[in-house]
Amino acid sequence: MNEERIVALDMPEQETPLDERQQKYLAVCREKLGFLPNVLSAYAFNSDKLAGFTALYNDLMLGDSGLTKLEREMIAVTVSSANHCYYCLTAHGAAVRKLSGDPKLGEQLVMNYRAAKLEPKQRAMLDFAWKLTTEPIAVDEPDRAALREAGWSDRDIWDIAATAAFFNMSNRMSSATDMRPNEEYHSQAR
């Protein structure tokens, strides 16, 4: 575990103990990534909070969807760019670099997704995620119609919206707690 503070809050070490399944999940993350993401360490003070976070994250980012893993990460970065979320821009920017094999794409999405050369379908997806983040009250049927016209199904639109909504929540938790990204993310896939 990182010796530096992960969040700016003094959370209890183990308010509720993690069950065997959760301990195994964290061990698998350490093994696969070579480190434990600080977001998981932050939520691990309470087994129920960790369970809720990981269940939703795993469903949205790893579950069955018409969106690729890369497209879901692109949404995470675009939403995090709108929200200026240091943790998520660093962590998910690294994921975009790794999944795309293109360090430039990761940086473009962090700074301004409109600068990236995207397929029209992906551009429509990110336009929607950006608007849902910056002007949620203004999202209307023409926005959904633009996604359909670009080739997304209604089920895909659900997944785009759910992924954007999850990262808006996650960004706000990261900002509220001053969550710090793992050092390892900064140099990945560059």
Image (tube, rainbow, N blue to C red):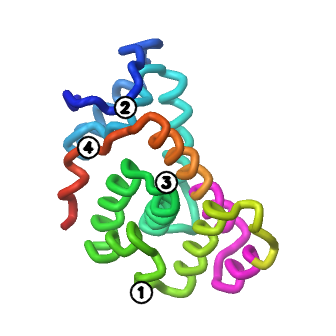
Pointer 4: what residue? 182
- Earlier in the chain: of badge 4 and badge 3, it is 3
In percent of width and height, residue 129 lies at 60, 66
Point out residue 7 in the picture as x, y percentages from the top left corner: 37, 31
Q: Which residue is mark 3?
A: 61
Which residue is situated farthest in the right direction here?
141
Residue at 42% in and 67% down: 70
Q: As shown in the figure, which amino acid type bears the numbered disc 3? A: Met
Q: Which mark is residue 26?
A: none
Marks 3 and 1, how far apart in space? 23 Å
Above/below status of 146 relative to 66: below
Separation (CA) of disc 1 from disc 4: 29 Å
**Taken as a whole, is the magenta stretch helix, strand or loop?**
helix
Q: CA distance from mark 4 to mark 2?
A: 12 Å
Of callouts 3 and 1, which one flags the residue occurring earlier in the amino acid sequence? 3
Crowding at dot 1, Cα within 10 Å, few <14 / some 14-19 / many 20+, comes out as: few
Residue linked to disc 2: 7
